Image (cartoon, rainbow, N blue to C red):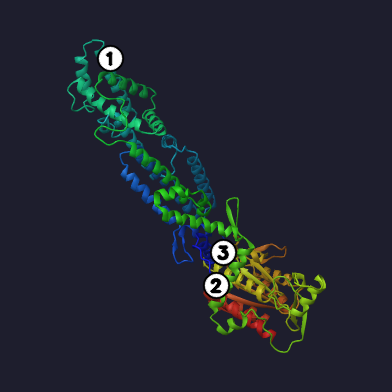
Amino acid sequence: MSFAYRRRRPEDNVEEDLDELLADLGEEVLDHGDVSRALDDLMRSGFIGADGQRVEGVDDLLERVRARRFELEGASSESPLERYAQWLEHVERLEAEGLESAVREAVESKDAARESDARRLAEGRNLERALWGSRFAERFESARHYEFASPEAAEEFGRLSDELTRDLAGTYFEAAKDALANPDPAALARLRDMMNNLSELLERRRRGEDVDAATEEFLEQYRDYFPDAHSLDDVVRSLAERSAAAESMFRSLSADQQDELRSLMSHLSEDADFDWSLHRLLSNLRHETPDLDWSRSGGSAGGPGWSDAVDATQSLAELRELESLLSRSGAALALPEVDVDHIRRHLGEDAARHVERLRQTISALRERGYLEARRGEFSLTPRAVSAIGKRALRDLFADAARAALAGGHLSRERDVRGERQETSRTFETGELVNLHVGDTLRNALRREGPGLPLRVAPEDFVVHDYEGEKRNATVFAIDLSRSMALRGNLGPAKKMLVAMVELIRQRYPRDFLAVVGFSALAFELKPDALVTLTIDDSYGTNLQHALALGRHLMRDQRGVRQIVVVTDGEPTAHLDGDGEPFFSWPPVHETLERTMAEVLRCTRAGIVINTFALDIERSQFPFVEQIARVNGGRTFYTSIDDLGAYVLDDFVTRRHRRAS
């Protein structure tokens, strides 16, 4: 005997990850109903894989990208362009945070008009910034004409603009930094005048004119620029050496970076003559210092070359792109856009494997038929909903901690009690198969004819049936008022419903099942939509309408009929004579009367009402107990943590008792 072995492939881990990941995804979706948000949260936080190893999430990778970016920025601090690009990003983050804070405050104020205005302002300003160019010079120019909503961002941009002006001027005129400590149009105009006056002095001297007196006047007027200069040659030499070094560094930059610096220099002043004055002076300085190498590149006066800075700039650009992708909302959708080669180059092979694992997980969820993506949003498929229901059902039995119940009613064998007259019937899709082998084979023979192999088709199936195993009808009525979400009751209640739907489909597939949601009004819910169910924004708990709708849905059903009500409070709404919802808190007497009238109708129709009251106040006990007295059903006072176990115990135990 021989065995073939192969190396474990990454996709093997992904396949094994899916079960637990789908369970985690189900818990998140049950909690708030948003599939895209739940998937985004899971991708951001990462997960423990089936191999026991933690798969880093997007937030982990984002932290590492930022750390690497900060490291490079620190190492390339001699690059002003990158420093100011980072600074401007900080300003933009302050603005975005200020707008988000304004929206949160407006939401908390409960002022709809204020909230609308805040959201409109945030959307408009965010869109405006999104249209800024991708290059720093373009973004800086746009920011100069942008009306900041955040005072902190406006103040920080003012500091950035002042510092940038000083540094740009100091690129050619080091001493000008101090003179431009608080730049304003007058200071920039003075710098422009200095350049023009110096150029005029040099041009006059080349023409043979006497400039001694003019030089003395120049030195006196611009002593703050040239504190150590005693002659025109001193001024020329200091400026020429600095300017030659600046030209060398400029040529070390890429063409795009050179364009950015040219653009930034043009922003030094609104006066178009500034750029002309600078180039006029540089030309004169070149003429006056033929001994200096003005054409050299790759170095700077007294410092290293800029080629490393250019490499760092490219790395920083890639890291910023990664940071932008990883930090935006919808991480799951952004993952395919992440350049894994960039991750590998900047964070290493291990980080690249984590990204690949996350991407493969998303792909596997889609390829295995659990997820669909449309218009930038994810949704669960029926297969995923079924898987989440099965997991919820397993959890429910575990929570119940009833070994006898679990053993007797989770068995996949048919539970046959008492003496029943056995019959057979055609198999109904979706039920547990208790196959009548003889009749099934006879059907296949009639269809296929004699001969082997005998092929059995779904339409051949015949299953055992028993007299006394009757179809039951159940309507689950779930309270979707605001308080259910505010108290944290909605998620666990949904999980209970999803589990019970799965139980009935698996164990009692012939039963009638419906789900009703109610707040100001009641409405039927599709069982497959329960996972993503959210609260209704309208006010009220209209139990009257929920019971009436449940009674209507079961009007043609026979056998035992029950409505299972899950609520966290007494009724606060009813339908008036015109069929319109009426809400009042505290509830008016008419609401309670109309609700009890519907309880009586259900009772006369033979419908049992079982009420599960979640953490209700003691003052509300009399009403829910009155429902039980009038109807004959039961009332359970339970916490949300015990809800599933209570519902499961009551449902299965009653069903088992009736079948005996």
What amino acid is at disc 2? Met
What amino acid is at disc 1? Glu
Q: Residue at x 43, y 50 (%)?
A: 343
Numbered disc 1: secondary structure: helix
Point out the image quarter for the N terminus.
bottom right
Of mark 2 and mark 3, the one earlier in the sequence is: 2
Displayed quadrant of residue 209: top left
Mark 2 vs mark 1: give the one in front.
2
Point out the image quarter for the C terminus.
bottom right
Residue that mark 3 sits on: 482
Percent of width and height locating residue 279: 34, 22
Of mark 2 and mark 1, the one earlier in the sequence is: 2
Q: Residue at x 30, y 21 (%)?
A: 281
Residue that mark 2 sits on: 1
Mark 2 vs mark 3, CA separation in Å: 66 Å
Percent of width and height locating residue 310: 36, 38
Residue that mark 1 sits on: 203
Q: Is residue 168 above or below residue 616?
A: above
Q: Which residue is most to the bottom?
A: 419
Percent of width and height locating residue 307: 34, 37
Q: Mark 2: few, some, or many residues within 10 Å (few <14, many ≥20)?
A: few
